[in-house]
Amino acid sequence: MNKLTPGKARALDARQAEQHEFGIVDKRGRSIGAVIYRFSVEVTETDDRDNYDVRWYRQNQFGTQYVFYFRATRNGIHFGGGKPDQWFATEAEREDAIRKYLQNAKARAAKAA
C-alpha cells in the first residue's frame, strides 16, 4: 500500500540546469528544446507534523532520492506549464528516465514542427 508518512527533505546538492536544443524550429521560427533540472535530497521521517517544511512521503521515498523535472523551451525560454518532480532511488534510474524523456520530447517536437 502507498501509505504516506510525514518527513523532511534536505538538499544534498544545488539544483543543476541543463539546456537541450533539439535542432528543430516550430512554425513560428522558434527553436524547440527543454531544460532539465537535477538535484538530490535526503528524506528523513519526522513526528513534527506541525512544522511548515514537513511533507508527506511514501515509504519508498525515505533515504537518498535523485530528482529531476523538466520544462519545455522555445528559443531557450520556458514554454508552457511545468511538470511534477520525478523521484528515483538511484542516480542511474534518474539518468535513464532523463534520456528517455529527451528522446520522446525530440520525437514530439519533430511531429509538431
Image (cartoon, rainbow, N blue to C red):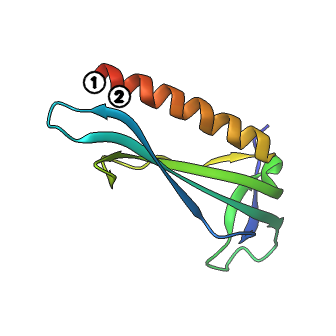
x%, y% of residue 71?
Answer: 43, 48
Residue under the point 38% across and 41% down = 33
The residue that mark 2 highlights is: 109
Left or right of residue 62, residue 4 in this image: left
Secondary-structure class at tag 1: helix
The quarter of the picture where residue 53 lies is bottom right
Pick the front one: 33 or 91: 33
Q: Residue at x 82, y 58 (%)?
A: 64
Q: Around disc 1, counting alpha carbons within 10 Å, would you say few (fewer than 14), some (14 to 19), or many (20 or more)?
A: few
In space, the residues marked 1 and 2 are separated at their CA atoms by 5 Å
Q: In this view, does 40 lie above or below 53?
A: above
Residue that protrudes farthest toward the front in the picture:
23
Residue located beneath label 1 in the image: 112
In front here: 48 or 100? 100
Query: Is any part of residue 5 visible from this angle?
Result: yes
Q: Which amino acid does label 2 sit on?
A: Ala
Which residue corresponds to the image point at 79% horizontal and 37% vertical from the top-left? Answer: 1
In the picture, the quarter occupied by the C terminus is top left
Amino acid type at circle 1 is Ala
Q: Please say if 80 is above or below 105.
A: below
Determine the image quadrant of residue 109: top left
Q: Is residue 24 above or below residue 111?
A: below
Dots 1, 2 in contact, CB < 8 A: yes
Q: Position of residue 40 (x, y in %)?
A: 72, 60
